[in-house]
């Protein structure tokens, strides 16, 4: 029986269809070879003892940017393949150029010309003598060129993987089959030549990596560069890392001269802000580092049958959960008020340690009672109204004490922690 496969999305059909039911593209279903014609030879089954396997070389290639190296596990492994993603215009190309300008780098771009990349390099004040450029988009040609000059480069950057195509696969660059084929060939090249490769990838409207999910499984690490374009802060996270942990994050600030590293845990707090109703400071752990954010909440009487819930920087469903807990256990008529919640700095807070601070800011705005600036909150709120201990809470409290917060509201499990100048209120 013949099989027709869509060259754009990979949809399969037993008969030819003019329009693909999955991706809605016309004339993309192509007839595949009959299964009877496939090679029926069986590969030899090989068993290897771990006693004969050489350990991985732990020598890492440092980028020179500590925040970047921290996230990838201390530097690049010799044959590591990283998928680097982020929203358009967030600064992916900028941070990549800054991170690898001290290494002999081949920058393969299918989206920009050499003149455009050079203009960015000059603006960032980067030395040009270590960066080579190519705008070739055919993966076979790229691999052949790297093979002929593999001793000339320490790292390969491909911007972006969605623009690269293979001459052995039909279809436009960026479709599922092309992404699978080109990524597989690039990964094989990286492993064979022992050279690290950075694949810059597009994201969809929902924030997912564009292309098949297998693309994320194939690479060694997946890094995401996050932040609002209107904010000058950016956060680098690892959602997958075979050569390190996924618990670390890197924090950067966008300046006129590019991205600079942020080491101050109070960087997201606006200095000099007075105490106001609805403002609370929360301490959370991003990876293993304590970071402090400012939560602002506005609670105002509603004129609607269903009150508004406008949330920015925090999970919307988490806010609904906290509002339900506050209403039930504190008997507050929140269904008569609109609630607007924002995390200052244009970043997203995903840690449950922010729950207690969010609840405090809601109550503060509702009661019109300000929370003093020397107070910090950390702790998760359960459905039964209890405050639960979060990961690295001891470290958050210790850092808050060091930074001079006078009162720290946390879980009851920290009642016996060493008290310095701060008052810990379980």
Image (cartoon, rainbow, N blue to C red):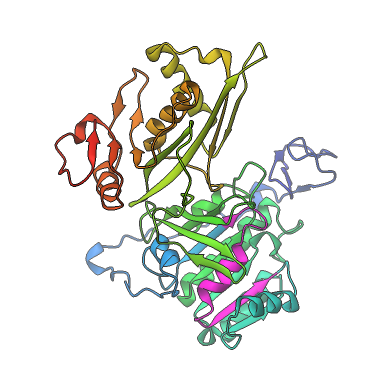
Identify whether 68 is placed above or below 381.
below
User: Is 60 inside the magenta-drawn segment?
Assistant: no
Q: Nearer the viewer, residue 214 or 95?
A: 95
- The quarter holding residue 337 reads top right
Q: Nearer the viewer, residue 322 or 188?
A: 322
The reply to whether residue 392 is in sight is yes
User: Is 101 inside the magenta-drawn segment?
Assistant: yes
Q: Can you give x and y, in whole percent of width and height, for residue 48 in the image?
A: 30, 62
- From the viewer's perspective, tell me whether residue 388 is left or right of residue 175: left
- The quarter holding residue 18 reads top right
Number of labelled discs?
0
The stretch of residues the image draws in magenta is 85-109
- The quarter holding residue 174 reads bottom right
Which residue lies at the image location 63% right of the left edge and 63% below the top edge? 182
- From the viewer's perspective, tell me whether residue 382 is left or right of residue 129: left
Q: Can you give x and y, in whole percent of width and height, for residue 304 in the image?
A: 67, 14
Query: Is the C terminus in the top left, top right, bottom left or bottom right quadrant?
Result: top left
Identify whether 219 is placed above or below 69.
above
The reply to whether residue 186 is in sight is no
Which residue lies at the image location 64% right of the left edge and 57% below the top edge? 179
Q: Can you give x and y, in whole percent of width and height, for residue 289 in the image?
A: 34, 53
Query: Is the N terminus in the top left, top right, bottom left or bottom right quadrant?
Result: top right
Q: Nearer the viewer, residue 190 or 282?
A: 282
């Amino acid at each position: 029986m013949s099989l027709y496969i869509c060259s754009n999305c990979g949809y399969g059909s037993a008969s030819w269809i003019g329009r693909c039911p999955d991706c809605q593209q016309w004339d993309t279903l192509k007839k595949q070879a009959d299964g009877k014609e496939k090679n029926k030879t069986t590969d030899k089954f090989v068993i290897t003892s771990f006693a004969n396997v050489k350990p991985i070389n732990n020598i890492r290639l440092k980028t020179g940017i500590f925040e970047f190296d921290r996230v990838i596990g201390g530097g690049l492994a010799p044959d590591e393949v990283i998928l680097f993603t982020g929203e358009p215009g967030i600064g992916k190309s900028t941070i990549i150029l800054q991170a690898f300008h001290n290494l002999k780098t081949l920058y393969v771009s299918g989206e920009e010309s050499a003149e455009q990349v050079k203009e960015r390099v000059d603006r960032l004040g980067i030395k040009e003598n270590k960066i080579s450029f190519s705008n070739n988009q055919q993966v076979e040609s790229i691999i052949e060129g790297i093979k002929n000059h593999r001793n000339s480069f320490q790292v390969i950057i491909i911007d972006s993987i969605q623009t690269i195509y293979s001459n052995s696969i039909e279809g436009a660059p960026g479709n599922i089959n092309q992404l699978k084929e080109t990524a597989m060939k690039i990964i094989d090249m990286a492993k064979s030549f022992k050279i690290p490769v950075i694949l810059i990838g597009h994201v969809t409207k929902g924030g997912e990596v564009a292309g098949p999910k297998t693309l994320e499984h194939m690479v060694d690490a997946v890094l995401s560069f996050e932040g609002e374009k209107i904010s000058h802060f950016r956060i680098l996270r690892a959602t997958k890392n075979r050569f390190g942990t996924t618990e670390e994050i890197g924090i950067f600030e966008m300046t006129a001269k590019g991205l600079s590293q942020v080491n101050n845990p109070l960087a997201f707090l606006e200095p000099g802000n007075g105490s106001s109703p609805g403002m609370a400071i929360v301490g959370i752990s991003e990876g293993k580092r304590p970071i402090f954010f400012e939560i602002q909440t506005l609670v105002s009487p509603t004129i609607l049958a269903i009150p508004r819930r406008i949330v920015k920087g925090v999970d919307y469903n988490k806010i609904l959960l906290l509002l339900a807990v506050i209403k039930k256990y504190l008997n507050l008529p929140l269904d008569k008020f609109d609630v607007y919640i924002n995390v200052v700095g244009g970043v997203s807070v995903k840690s449950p340690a922010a729950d207690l601070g969010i609840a405090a800011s809601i109550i503060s705005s509702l009661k019109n009672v300000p929370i003093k600036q020397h107070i910090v909150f950390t702790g998760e709120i359960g459905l039964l109204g209890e405050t639960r201990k979060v990961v690295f809470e001891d470290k958050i409290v210790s850092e808050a004490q060091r930074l001079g917060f006078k009162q720290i509201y946390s879980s009851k499990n920290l009642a016996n922690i060493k008290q310095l100048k701060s008052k810990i209120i379980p």
